[in-house]
Amino acid sequence: MKDEVRLSKLMADKGLCSRREADRLIAGGLVKVNGVVVSQLGSKVARDAQIELLKEGARQLEELVTFVINKPVGWVSGQAEKGYRPAAALLRPENQSSLYRQSPLRKKHFEGLAPAGRLDIDSQGLLILTQDGSLARQIIGENSKLEKEYLVRIEGQVTSETLKRLRFGLQLDGQPLKRAQVEQLNPDQLRFVLKQGKKRQIRRMCELVGLRVTGLKRVRIGGLLLGRLQEGQWRFLRRSERRLLLDPDQKSLSSS
């Protein structure tokens, strides 16, 4: 029927979890639709169906972890490549920030872990690794409204026309870029705020206006700030911060 949709897709659309997580919960018999347990993968339901997670399903989602890392230059965000180390290798007990110390690392924390927004090898700063598909979708999905803020060191002359072009009017890969916030902090540094994330976007934008990027650091995603997290260290994302990322209209909770 036209008004029916796959249950896993509907759960993802409602923000309950990712489609992959939904399939796992459905297969485990942990999802009720209109009061009835549905355990058949691929099941279709009405778009206005009432979806309920059993307690065990809700508990499993609550246990999904997200890490906040201050990635150094020379580390890759995802899988190891060309001899470069993956940022996940920083997740060791000795690298946990003492400023935010919470629970200890466990083996299960590394299962299904993936970056929610990448930083290239030559960039540093705020990187999120997560098991939480809903959170990842909110950060990097096509409809994401979260701002990403960067401090960028450059070489070259910055003029009012340069800033105007960086803010709006450039194209990459044959497509116009969304409007960006760009301001000059000093002769050698710019501040970028973007709502999209094309590959090496800021570096390529700067090249188009005759600037060379010598350093790039991400300091904010939505209301989540890098704060005092030291380079190479990590911490767990707090529940309050997760809510902040899921609701981009909220103000930043912490600058520490």
Image (tube, rainbow, N blue to C red):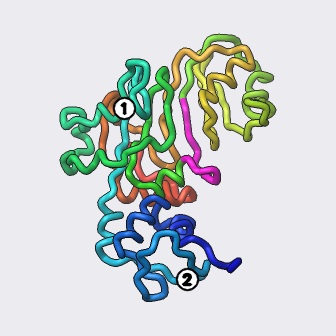
Q: Tell me the crowding category of disc 1: few under 14, some 14 to 19, or many 20 or more residues within 10 angstroms, Cα based.
A: many
Which numbered disc flags the more N-terminal residue, 2 or 1?
2
Q: Position of residue 36 (x, y in %)?
A: 43, 87
Q: Which mark is residue 49?
A: 2
Under tag 1, what secondary structure? helix
- Residue 41 to residue 185: above or below: below
- Which residue lies at the image location 55% right of the left edge and 82% below the top edge? 49
> As drawn, is 54 to the left or to the right of 35?
left
- Cα separation, mark 2 vs mark 1, equals 40 Å
Q: Residue furthest bottom?
A: 35
Q: Nearer the viewer, mark 2 or mark 1?
A: 2
Please name the residue that numbered disc 1 is placed on.
87
Of residue 82 and residue 171, the one placed in the foreground of this image is 82
- The secondary structure that dominates the magenta segment is loop
Q: Position of residue 33 (x, y in %)?
A: 47, 82
> As drawn, is 94 to the left or to the right of 80?
left
Asked if the magenta segment contains residue 221, the reply would be no
- Which residue lies at the image location 56% right of the left edge and 19% below the top edge? 153
The amino acid at mark 1 is Ala
Of residue 191 and residue 11, the one placed in the foreground of this image is 11
Magenta extent: 140-150
- Which residue lies at the image location 53% right of the left edge and 60% below the top edge? 247
Asked if the magenta segment contains residue 149, the reply would be yes
